[in-house]
Amino acid sequence: MTTTQVAGSQQRHRKRQSALLRLWSSTVGKKAVMAVSGAVLLLYVVAHMAGNLKAFAGPGALDSYGRFLREFGAPVLGHGGLLWVVRVVLLLAVVLHMTAAVQLARRARRARPVGYAKRAKVQGSYAARTMRWGGVIIALFVVYHLLDLTAGVLNPNGVPGQIHANVVADFQHWYVVLAYTLAVVALGFHLRHGVFSALRSLGVASAKRAAAVRATALGVAVVVTAGFLSVPFAVLFGIIA
């Protein structure tokens, strides 16, 4: 490669970096990052929910599913390599999602620097008003969930590979089910508002489609919430043992 070609390649690289920085620094860009990273997290949530439902297929179904995930792509990625790839992608999505959310919130506050003597009643849905606290609840629950069912540190059974037994050991306790329910309900509210906001940021939720998009967001939230809660309550009431 000649010196001219190298210089041209470097210039194109700098232009791409500059374009990405301009996109990230803009409000529209941050909303787009939130939408795309949220979509990645939503896909994982739906896949995770579908995997959980294998608990209804019998005691060995969850354990077999866990072995499949750990062994998939093993010749190339190594044992459990796929799970680590997924974890890295999810961690990146979470960091981008939370960073964009915090920066957008700060930008909104700076845009209205003067406080009000009497604050007007906030309009919008309950989900919109509690997105921040919902995100905090979900983040704290994810930490607990990883220590419980991934690391096994907080699980009453906590035996690696015995996924079904670990799940049953957990949800036999009403207080664990209660904590799980609060977190999943918070996730449902977060999804209801987040899916609608993401589709609006990506230009899908036009004025004509707003009602349909709201219904879609509500449907996604209800399905995910019901799917996640079905397993702990089935264990609590003895349907899954």
Image (cartoon, helix red, strand yellow):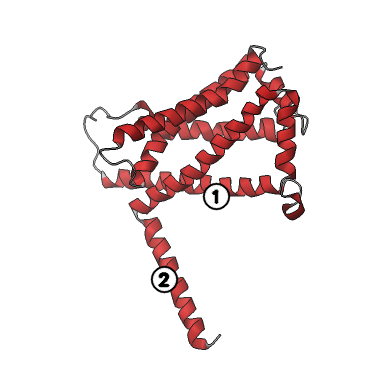
**Residue 111 visible to the viewer:** yes
Which amino acid, mark 1? Leu
Going from N to C along the chain, the mark reached first, 2 or 1, is 2
Relative image position of residue 160 (x, y in whole percent): 77, 33
Q: Quadrant of residue 101?
A: top left
Q: Residue furthest top?
A: 237
Q: Position of residue 114 (x, y in %)?
A: 23, 42
Q: Which mark is residue 180?
A: none
Judging by the rendered image, the residue that carries numbered circle 2 is: 15
**Can residue 153 be spotted in the picture?**
no
Are discs 2 and 1 less than 8 Å apart at CB? Answer: no
Q: Amino acid at mark 2?
A: Lys
| Quadrant of the image occupied by residue 25 | bottom left
The residue labelled by disc 1 is: 92
Horizontally, is 42 left or right of 155 in the view?
Answer: left
Q: Quadrant of the N terminus?
A: bottom right
Q: Is residue 209 left or right of residue 58?
A: left
Give the position of the C terminus as an image quadrant: top right
Q: From the viewer's perspective, is residue 151 above or below residue 60?
A: below
Determine the residue positioned at 51% across, 30% down.
137
Q: What residue sits 25% from the left and 27% below the top? A: 121
Q: Secondary structure at mark 2?
A: helix
- Number of numbered discs present? 2
Q: Identify which residue, 186 or 80, lies in the foreground.
A: 80
Q: Position of residue 225 (x, y in %)?
A: 51, 26
Q: Is residue 121 left or right of residue 53?
A: left
Q: CA distance from mark 2 to mark 1?
A: 24 Å
The residue located at (39%, 32%) in the rendering is: 216
Where disc 1 sits, the SS reads: helix
Q: Residue 7 location, x and y as percent?
A: 48, 82
- Callout 2 crowding tier (Cα within 10 Å): few <14, some 14–19, many ≥20: few
Label 1 environment density (alpha carbons within 10 Å; few <14, some 14–19, many ≥20): few
